Image (cartoon, rainbow, N blue to C red):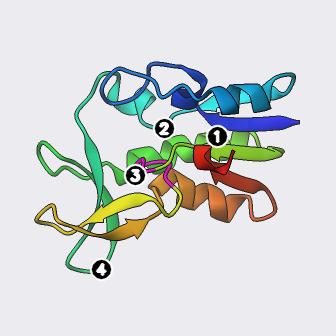
Amino acid sequence: MKVVVSACLLGEACRYDGCSKKEDRVLTFVEGKEVIPFCPEAPVFGTPRGRISVVATEEGMLRVKKDADGSDVTEALIEQTEVLIKAHPDADRIILKAKSPSCGIATTPILDESGNEIGKGNGVAADLLLHAFPDVEITDEGGF
């Protein structure tokens, strides 16, 4: 069984703050399985890095922007996710980090352009993975 897992859940210090979010329940689940660590942010921005957020634009589009300067980084995250999709089209299960602007599934804060939370939704990578793998179980760490 091939399992794609948010790298921070595996204990990799790849989060924006240079830490991990190691999740023992996930580690137990993946024992004996082929594990593919995934973090679309670290290769693009490095670790540690400034925070990013999902922002609803005035045009109604969801974009990922750097909190510090508002620059749009959506395309870079899409490219990293597409690399994973092409490299592992045979993934059997995907486990992502809740609330992440990249990996959250229905838990990611969506902000307006003033920085106010207006709802919850998917992170950009999670959204792409949900569409690319419609028959694969995709959950966050809360699903254990």
Name the amino acid type tagged 2: Pro
The secondary structure that dominates the magenta segment is: loop
- Residue at the (51%, 40%) spot, across then down: 80
Q: Which residues are magenta?
A: 99-104
Q: Residues within 10 Å of mark 2 (few under 14, many from 20)?
A: many
The amino acid type of the residue labelled 3 equals Glu
Q: Amino acid at mark 4?
A: Gly
Circle 3 sits on which residue? 75
Circle 4 sits in a helix, a strand or a loop, which is it? loop
Q: Compute the Cα span from label 4 to label 1.
A: 27 Å
Residue 89 visible in image: no
Q: Judging from the image, what secondary structure is the residue with disc 1 in?
A: helix
The quadrant holding residue 23 is top right
Count numbered badges in the picture.
4
Q: Which residue is identified by label 2?
A: 40
Where residue 90 sits, quadrant-wise, is top right
**Upstream in the sequence, badge 2 or badge 3?**
2
Give the residue at x 66% y 43%: 95
Which residue is depicted at the point 35% across and 24% down? 46
Marks 1/3 in contact by CB < 8 Å: the verdict is no
Query: How crowded is the residue under tag 3: few (<14 C-alpha within 10 Å), some, or many (20+)?
Result: few
Q: Which residue is mark 1?
A: 84
SS for dot 2: loop
Can you see residue 110?
yes
